[in-house]
Amino acid sequence: MAILNIIKVGDPALRKTSRPIDKITDRIRILAADMIETMHEAEGAGLAAPQVGVLRRMVVIETEEEETYVLINPEITERCGRQRNVEGCLSVPGEWGITDRPETVTVKYTDLDGEEQTLSGSDLLARAICHELDHLEGKLFIDDAIMIHEDDAMDIMFGDLDPQEIVDDVEGGEDEQ
Ligand SMILES: [Zn+2]
């Protein structure tokens, strides 16, 4: 197994649409294992194949319970509610932003054995699924986020700051509803 190089914002590969995987070959299995190792080494909650320069529709995700999923050709089939929280990306190091994501999503995908699966997640898992799937469309979180200072990002992550307060500041206290 190998630690792969994570490409960074500015690399045109991050802006391309990834192609479906029609056959789960040994190459795909090795790529999945390498992506998991790379995600762990980088301490990320997810990684998409285009982030390691491979324009194929596969992402790896790790839940807060440290369960790891490999999602091949994933498609979101259900979105419920809304959450507003802080987000970062291994391809955009040191940058943080507040994004709106569904509170809960369900994704259908093919696993490494070629079996159809579904995964539902809320909170962090829902955010990770949406974030990683966006990479397959060439989309980055910075496209829609309200970018914030790293100190504020850490405060939000540790529960010391409500992301809504920052959004209110940025929007001049206007109620966005
Ligand atoms: Zn990312």
Image: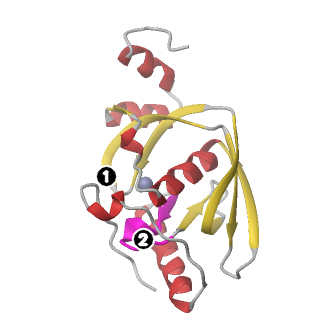
* Three-letter code, disc 2: Leu
Residue at image coords 62%, 50%: 125
Q: Which residues are magenta?
A: 45-56
Q: Is residue 113 above or below residue 12?
A: below
Which residue is denoted by mark 2 in the rendering?
55
Label 1 sits on residue: 93
SS class, disc 2? loop
Q: What residue is rendered at 63% in x and 67% in y?
A: 68
Q: In the rendered structure, are the residues bearing label 2 and label 1 in contact, judged by CB atoms less than 8 Å apart?
A: no
Image side of residue 164 versus residue 71, left or right = left
Numbered circles on residues, count: 2
Position in image of residue 3 (x %, y %):
39, 77
Instruction: Using a 10 Å C-alpha cutoff, classify the residue at mark 1 as few (fewer than 14 neighbours), some (14 to 19) or many (20 or more).
Output: few
Residue pictured at 45% horizontal, 69% vertical: 49
> In the rendered view, does 168 fall on the left or right side of 83?
left
Q: Residue 169: x and y, percent?
A: 38, 15
Which mark is nearer the camera, 2 or 1? 2
